Amino acid sequence: MSNDDIIGDPGLRKPIDSYPFEIRDSLRRRYLAKGPCQPVGHEFPFTLIREKNQRFQVAWFKDYEWLEYSVSKDKAYCLYCYLFANNNRSGGNVFTEIGFNNWKDGRRAFVNHEGSLGSSHSGCRMKVEQYRNQRGNVNQLLARQTTAMEDDYRTRLSMVVSVARILLEEGLPFRGHDESAESLHRGNFLEHISWVCKREENVNKVMGKNAPGNNQLTSPTIQRDIIECCAMETRKIILNELGEKKFALLVDEAEIVQFVNDKGMVLERFLGLVHVNETSAKVLKNAIDTFFAKHDLSLAKLRGQGYDGAANMSSEFNGLKTLILKENKNAHYIHCDFFETLSMIVNTIGASCKRKDSLREIHNEEVLNQVEMGEISTGRGQNQEISLARPGDTRWGSHYTTIVRLFDMWNSVERVLLAINKLGESLKIRQSAGGVFDKMDCFQFVFIGKFMMKILGITNTLSKILQARDQNIGYALNMINVVKNKLQELREDGWDNLLKEVTEFCEGHSIDEPNMENFVHGRSRKRLKGGEPMTYLHHFRIDIFIKVIDVIAMEMDKHFTEANTELLRCVMCLDPSNSFANFDHVRLLQLAKLYSDDFSSTDIIELDHQLQNYICDMRSNEIFSNISNLGDLAKKMVEINYHTYFPLVYRLIELALILPVGTASVERTFSAMNVVKTDLRNRLGDDLLSDCLVCYFEKEIFRSIDDEVIMQSFQNLASRRNQLRPLKIRRPNPC
């Protein structure tokens, strides 16, 4: 059984008796551990009933703990009856399969459903209580567990949970290739337990060969259950912290929610991974809907969406952005051969320590010769030892660094490639190095390299601003305009300087240069649309130089449209720096109108008056005189209770803070996944990987959870042979 069998939305579940008998017990326990689907923050739609608009009331969740709501069907269900009811008995299947939606008679129908002590629902409720009280079930009574056995079991389980926590926090693998008793490398989990047993006699007495043969608590299934419970309890804290707050969704290879907590702090929380068979917008949207239902999240509370720039994510007509905007208009959206060769160069040089050391020595020798000849100067901090930087999968800035270092170390790199070509470990390696050298030692590679260095140099600052954890929207807006202007300048006036720079570099490194007036030769001889042969000048200037700049400018316009740029300009009016110099009353009202579900027409009128008082107070109050960013402003307002004095202004600040300007967080998450899912753990299942990542990324929350919470969660996840006596649990406080 996988986590995919646990369907969050009750309207989409299969009947419990349609599953194989052997997994029904586990399914029931997992559903009970998760709890009923109660999307508290959902905007429940109105339904015309007897000429009146009626809808589901969120207050019903507090009165009926068994009550579930299906977002997809707009109907109510009963979790207890779904898990245990026999639909042939009286009461029918309204609350298990059909669903209830006569909201006008809601409370009366719920009371009737509960019925008397002999009702079907009461019978299901009693079975739920029996499931939750494993200590009182028949198997437990037959086992006649003594107090000493319970104490031993607690010691054993506590030890296992402690070891699992260490491995999860550090992103380490659990299993070993050979876990037999004779193996010297049984894997981190078993080796850590063995290490503790050798040093703690009280643990050694109840572990390993001293433990009951059927209750070792070290099997792969037990390990997976503990990991699942660790992740489940971590997610519970995140979701409780989120509560009914508005949030933004950041999606790339992972799903992250961004929201403002009760202290006015902007938080980004990793919730997990969702496996999809394809990345079409429709499939991604279905995956998000399923993920939201599983964690009782509501799309209606979404106030921002940030994705990568792939066409299937941001396409105006078919993209995920548009599909979400159709359901929620307030979820605002913000967002080569050369590089293959570049990666081949870095990979060939960096394939062994010997090659990297050789490159370092040769480059140091080159620098020393240049210093002796007076070609470069010396001084503190100059000519420090460098190496080729490997370009990252999620950072264009890393490509910029790689290109800069490659041209700085050009002669050294060529010498190493030639050495590998002559003295490589095998014929294949020698041929590969020779092929890479030939691709590098040509005019086109140099031209594109120098050109991309200019392009990435122009965009690098903007990239860093958008990737920063504390984003300054004012700086970002200014830099967007700077980048657009610099790209236009490069297009109009940069060709001659670029060609001159490339030509001088090729002459200095004995690289053949084509005559720009000659026609392009080769088997794939390029022609213009009219059928005429293409000159090298046309190829490099029109097909590469102009075309690349136009594509980047078009992408800039697509990512930073007039609509979302205007949105950012409005947000910038909340910036507290320089005594709220950017404050603009009219634009802030315009910003509020963009969030029509959060500001009614009456709210807009009241906000108008609040803004006038707010700006006067802010500029005259010394408490706010040194605050320079929106995040600090929100925290200070909560700290001195100003968020209650200006509630509508603070609501506007919250919405501004969760508006995603970039997807740096999910990119950082994707990069960090390599720590958890290494080449040696490439068979890690999606559910297990997601659980491991939640504990690893949200380490601070995970560490705050008491061991007893995880142990009780583990106990309730399945039917256990041994039981724990309930202890007083220390509940963690959210950050």
Image (spheres, rainbow, N blue to C red):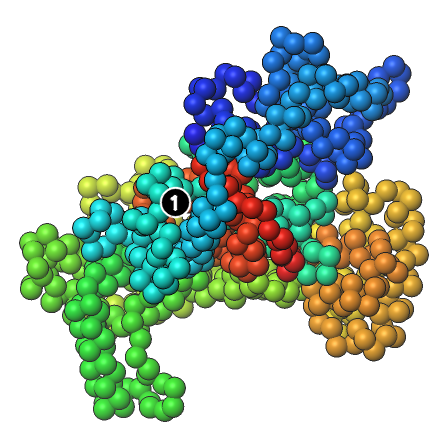
Indicate left or right for 94 with 584 as reference: left
Residue 560, image x, y percentages: 60, 51
Q: Amino acid at mark 1?
A: Leu
Indicate left or right for 41 with 322 as reference: right
- Observer able to see residue 263: yes
Residue 338, image x, y percentages: 31, 54
Residue at disc 1, secondary structure = loop
Give the residue drawn at x 33%, y 89%. Answer: 377
Indicate left or right for 448 with 602 as reference: left
**Dot 1: few (<14), some (14–19), or many (≥20) neighbours within 10 Å?**
many
Residue 686, image x, y percentages: 42, 39
Give the residue drawn at x 72%, y 16%. Answer: 119
- Observer able to see residue 516: no
Residue 21 image-quadrant placement: top left
Indicate left or right for 17 with 476 as reference: left
Q: Nearer the viewer, residue 381 or 440?
A: 381
Q: Is residue 617 depicted above or below 589 in this figure?
A: below
User: Quarter holding the C terminus?
Assistant: bottom right
Give the residue drawn at x 20%, y 68%. Answer: 353
Q: Nearer the viewer, residue 543 or 330?
A: 330
Q: Is residue 226 depicted above or below 513 in this figure?
A: above
Q: Nearer the viewer, residue 468 or 440?
A: 468
Q: Nearer the viewer, residue 476 or 541?
A: 476
Q: Is residue 176 depicted above or below 477 in this figure?
A: above
Q: How many marks?
A: 1
Q: Which residue is mark 1?
A: 217
Residue 282, image x, y percentages: 53, 30
Give the residue drawn at x 69%, y 55%. Answer: 260
User: Quarter holding the N terminus?
Assistant: top left
